[in-house]
Image (cartoon, rainbow, N blue to C red):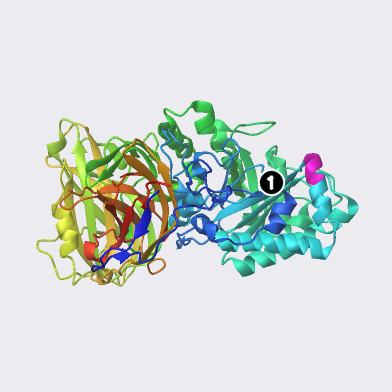
Amino acid sequence: MPSFQPAAEHRGTTVLHETISTRLQPLPARHFDTSTTEPISFFLSGLEELLAWQPDGNDDFNVAAVPLAQRQPPLHSRRPRTLVCHDMRGGYLEDRFIQGSATRNPYIFYHWRHIDIFVYFSHHTVTIPPVCWTNAAHRNGVPVLGTFITEWTGGEKLCEAFLAGGAEAYRAVSDQLARIAQHYRFDGWLINIENTLSAVAVENLAPFLRHLTAQVHSAVPGGLVIWYDSVLENGALKWQNELNEQNRVFFDACDGLFVNYNWKEEHLERTRRLARQRHADVYIGVDVFARGDVVGGGFDSDKSLSLIRKHSLSAAIFAPGWVYEHLGEENFLQNENKFWGLLADYLPTHSICTLPLATSFSLGMGTSRFLTGKEEEAGPWYNLSAQEIQPLYTESESQLITSCCLQDAWCGGSSLRVQGTIPPGEERVAIRLFSFQMQAPPKLFLNLLYKMEGPHRDEFAVALELTTWHSGTCHDGNVTPLPEPHGRHHPRLLPAPPPGLSKLLAACSHGSHGWTSRCYELELQGCVLRDLSLLVSRHQSSPQETRFTCLLGEVRVLDAASVAASPPQVQSVTASQVWWQEGPDAQQLSLSLTLRWAFPPGRANHFRVLSLGTRCRRGQPQQRQLLGLAHACLFRVVGLAVPRPAAGQSCQLELLVEPVMPNELPVDPDRWGRLVLVYSEPAGGSS
């Protein structure tokens, strides 16, 4: 088999100067797929695995790379919240593949603007959320909880072992759970004890919850521990469907209570009275599958939400995968928008409170992968870590609907389709895309990429509108304060590139494949941003209603002061865990390896890992190939076909790491990372 040899050093390229063994030690099955060596997410089974857990170098793929984004109102506000508890066929399906999979019609979630907490649920003892879910949720400002569950006879034995064992035993469990959340960078735990407890065990249950909550709060900023309504203070397993004196001791010991699903309005009335000022910490369960005696599930879940909100309580929506599992995969996106659209009146919107905002609306899946408006790779793909900041989706009987378009995109796997009607006599309509609550910088740059569809596409004009909250001091540039209660600001098109913005304008001018690009600037003084909307107007007024369809490929809202900042250099690209295999044909080898590199934390949105191909002789042409996206400073190249060198010959493989910044402005190739691998057959042929 080939061995590495040193290659000539040149600028911006890391070259290996040591011989690396090609005989790979078996990678741990918990962290890597045994057949392909792809990195995978995992769970822990039983008390022994939990107590034996230690951080491991192979864990790095499972550590969330996206910090929890700020948004308003914050979680600790008194506004009733919405928790979503994922329960998709037992979990750890295609979402366990950290670098994605070629899954057609996968289950995804993207209505983040309407929810406060996401719980990844399964029936394994310790459910560590797959890192792709944590990355997607954090990018959209939603904390993620794992699940600690014990059930039935096996659960009784497990609880007896750590709860009846006294303070030292239950503290060991809570300390490990807090360490796990801290290490993998998710935000806490749902504790679900669904088995009878002995008198000794239940006596230690509330102290266990108090200690776990304290440890999680200490280890994870903003961390949470939520208790599921199951066991009573006497140790009996008896779901109460409310907060009452028999389960209150556990509610008092942690951050919240997830109430079972078979409640009626009188349960809510009693719960509200007993919870008092902590009413937002009680999450009333809504089983979307409508199992048992429930008020409403499925497309009638709004009946449950209506009563929950009537009593100012939080909601816990359990198993919204009903839309996917019950109604089927083919029309999932349409049914998903319908489901959440029916709940929208009971789900307050969360606002963005930091810039930059840059999104191409990708859901983290697609039937193809697009780059600058053209297909880069054909075929289905799925990777929730690649999901971008999601807008407000409108699905109602109004004349405006936003939805996902998988057939065409500017970048990633999808664009945002905006469909609507301009009413008779009206000149334009506004479609709200994002809600803000933040002080506006003195100057903003905005970028819009769009494509009109339909036979009358030339009859419409498209622009962006920013609104600001009412303020006596807010105004545009030198203009006097605006008389409207909420100021409407229409940014002006940029006629020429100002300093530091030439790259953005260059990207804007390259709109192709039917896409149109517009760049704007807006100067504000003393303003607080409120909403970003898309304005669609017709060139001529008409007594008839006019229908339109517009695809949005990308939207950026940037603080002008940050645009000129030079991105860092990708440094110290290295390779490890190298694995050679025969094939796929006699003249080829299959190469797998782990790349690592250095880049300032939090500075990149993600990285594109590319191959320039392999050259075994001078003058051989190179062809760039996308190997995948990395969301941390490491990536596993899996099964890359490379030519087998002839006897006495060496081949050179060049790999590139391109950083993609949060503002999505292009980064010069001289700041990318590069790694050159030179390999040759050892004397005597392959080994």
Residue lying farthest to the left in this orientation: 496
* Residue 291 rendering spot, x and y as whole percentages: 66, 31
Answer left or right for 1 relative to 565.
right
Residue lying farthest to the right in this orientation: 199
Residue 389 can be seen in this image: no
Q: Nearer the viewer, residue 444 or 639?
A: 639
Look at the picture and state if 214 lies above or below 430.
Answer: below
* Residue appearing at x 82%, y 47% in the figure: 157
Q: Nearer the viewer, residue 349 or 503?
A: 503
- Residue 525's quadrant in the figure? bottom left
* Residue appearing at x 46%, y 41% in the figure: 108
- Residue 187's quadrant in the figure? bottom right
Secondary structure under the numbered disc 1 in the rendered image: strand
Look at the picture and state if 335 lies above or below 181.
Answer: above
Residue 358 can be seen in this image: yes
Q: How many marks?
A: 1
Instruction: Please give the range of residues in magenta.
Output: 152-156
* Residue 51 rendering spot, x and y as whole percentages: 71, 58
Residue carrying label 1:
259
* Residue 485 rendering spot, x and y as whole percentages: 32, 60
Answer left or right for 569 relative to 216.
left
Answer left or right for 348 relative to 168.
left
Q: Amino acid at mark 1?
A: Val
Helix, strand or loop: magenta stretch: helix
Around disc 1, counting alpha carbons within 10 Å, would you say few (fewer than 14), some (14 to 19), or many (20 or more)? Answer: many
Q: Is 491 inside the magenta-drawn segment?
A: no
* Residue 620 rendering spot, x and y as whole percentages: 18, 49
* Residue appearing at x 68%, y 67% in the figure: 214
Look at the picture and state if 85 lies above or below 445.
Answer: above
